Amino acid sequence: MNAMMDELIHKAIGESIADLAAATGDEMYVVEAAIRAGGRKIELTVDTDKGVSIGQCAKLSRAIRARLEACEDNIMLAEGDFDLMVSSPGIGEPVKVQRQYLRHLGRLIRVNYLDGEAQPKEITGRLLEAAVGAVEEAPSITIEAVREGRKKRTAGEPPVTIRLADVVKAVVQAGL
């Protein structure tokens, strides 16, 4: 029963995102979808390559709700007996989907990763490049380290390229 409800919810999310993209030209994607309490609580985090506005979240929420309430196969959904929250990832939230790196090019990012000897490392710097659609090589990001402090000047070191497979956690930092 829960698998069938999850499938209905995911289908409604996918169709609603596709419809919104067709109407607005903004290609939205799911960063995270959590379905809890047997489908009574749905939390969705979405993004675009340009960022998501509150208005886009509201439109998507209305579209998903309308689709779910039209599900005659499931009385709980049809009666609207669920909570739906649609939001965008905020500053300070970890990067969860490779495509998010593209949106944050030029921004400060703190990355915890494993080096070539599988030793934990951390770097804070400006995200210079994100090779996330690379077919020939492994997806990676390139970061120019900055000095800690108010002015965030470059550290004078060459940029570091990190394979995304080695990234443990990446968090966009506030500031330019």
Image (cartoon, rainbow, N blue to C red):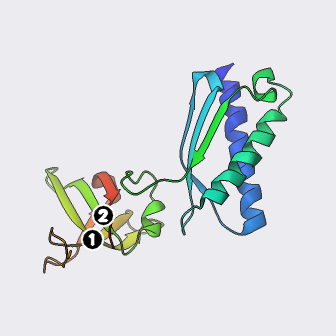
Camera-side residue: 28 or 1?
Answer: 28
Q: Mark 1 or 2 closer to N-term?
A: 2
Kind of residue at disc 2: Ile
The local secondary structure at tag 1 comes to strand
Q: Which residue is mark 2?
A: 109
The local secondary structure at tag 2 comes to strand
Q: Which residue is mark 1?
A: 143
Q: Pointer 1 and pointer 2: residues touching (CB < 8 Å)?
A: yes
**Which residue in the rendered view is the most extreme toward the top?**
1
Q: Which mark is residue 172?
A: none
Instruction: Give the image location of residue 49, x and y in percent.
Output: 54, 67
Q: Please tell me in which quadrant of the rendered image residue 84 appears.
A: top right
**Residue beneath the point at 31% across and 62% down:** 173
**Residue beneath the point at 20% across and 76% down:** 151
Where is the N terminus found, in terms of image quarters? top right
**Residue beneath the point at 76% across and 48% down:** 63
- Left or right: where 28 falls relative to 108: right
Q: How crowded is the residue under tag 1: few (<14 C-alpha within 10 Å), some, or many (20+)? A: many
Can residue 115 be spotted in the picture? no
Instruction: Give the image location of residue 152, x and y in percent.
Output: 21, 74
- 86, above or below 143, in the image: above
- 88, above or below 53, in the image: above
The CA span between labels 1 and 2 is 8 Å
